[in-house]
Image: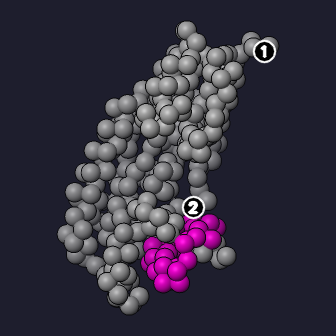
Amino acid sequence: MEDGKRLCILHGNCQGEILAALLSASPEFSAAYRVEFYVNFTRQAIPEASLSRCALLLHQHLGEQWGDLASGFLKSRLPAGARALCYPNMFFKGYWPFWSGKAGIDFRDSMLDSLLDRGLPPSDVMRMALSRNLPAMFGLQDMLAETFAREEAKQALCDVPYLDVLRRGYRAERLFNTINHPRTRLMLHAADAGLELLGMPPLPEEFRSRCPELFAEFELPINPRVAECYGLAFAGEDTPYNVFGTPMRYMEYAALYVDCRLAGRGDFIAYLQGN
């Protein structure tokens, strides 16, 4: 490279974009590498010319079904002497066990859906959403165990661990804003852990102290009964969440979800934003 820096390819989702920004705050990393970021979930192609010059591949694990973007294939295209480190695709349903990726509406909630699909009127749906029987009705403890088991299996494929931090802290401090948007503490941990593997010091304290909260534009509200069941110290019936600039309690958010479903709207984000 003309500036003497080696090429680092960072392949990932929105967390990867944040990671690239955090690593740029490391004087040692910035002096050693120039970063090219490629979005994995949109299947953005990585030019062969870049792969042939890559000295460091930072990637989230992708299986063989991703073809020429699969982790194994990308690593096979790196030049001799290049290094590859897998960082986590952090995902946590522990605050939102009813989240579902099923198509049809953004941030789908399987519990609210099940009540609506039974033909219950909105008033009954809202009442049952805060039922004291919710943990037993839906097996919330089993759902939490399944969440951690799934993340343990994913972490086994990574070089950068994060579950110890999550297990120790998820009850006392909100560590995710949505299922796939970790807050600043976890992202700083991922950056520091990666730097350590590269033999570099952690991010400067001055930077850490002024680093803003990440993914803060939308805090997915947490059902208070889930919070009680899991012992979440920071979430209750009156806890406000930032929902695209509007402070909103869980029941206010859930009422909008029900209204959106009954209106047949699929773009719940636009609905929350008043569009």
Residue to which mark 2 is pinned: 218
Residue to which mark 1 is pinned: 3
Position of 152 relative to 30 (above/below): below
The spot of residue 82 in percent (x, y) is: 56, 14
Residue 31 as seen in the image, left or right of residue 88: right
Furthest residue to the left? 136
- Of labels 1 and 2, the one closer to you: 1
- Give the residue at x 35% y 87%: 119
Asked whether disc 1 touches disc 2, contact meaning CB atoms under 8 Å apart, the reply is no
Residue type indicated by callout 2? Phe
The spot of residue 116 in percent (x, y) is: 37, 82
How would you rate the neighbour count of disc 1 (Cα within 10 Å): few for under 14, some for 14-19, many for 20 or more? few
Name the image quarter holding the N terminus: top right
Residue type indicated by callout 1? Asp
Distance from Cα at disc 1 to Cα at disc 2: 39 Å
Q: Which residues are magenta?
A: 241-270
Residue 143 found in image quarter: bottom left
Is 242 a magenta residue? yes
- Give the residue at x 43% y 59%: 101
Q: Earlier in the sequence, mark 1 or mark 2?
A: 1
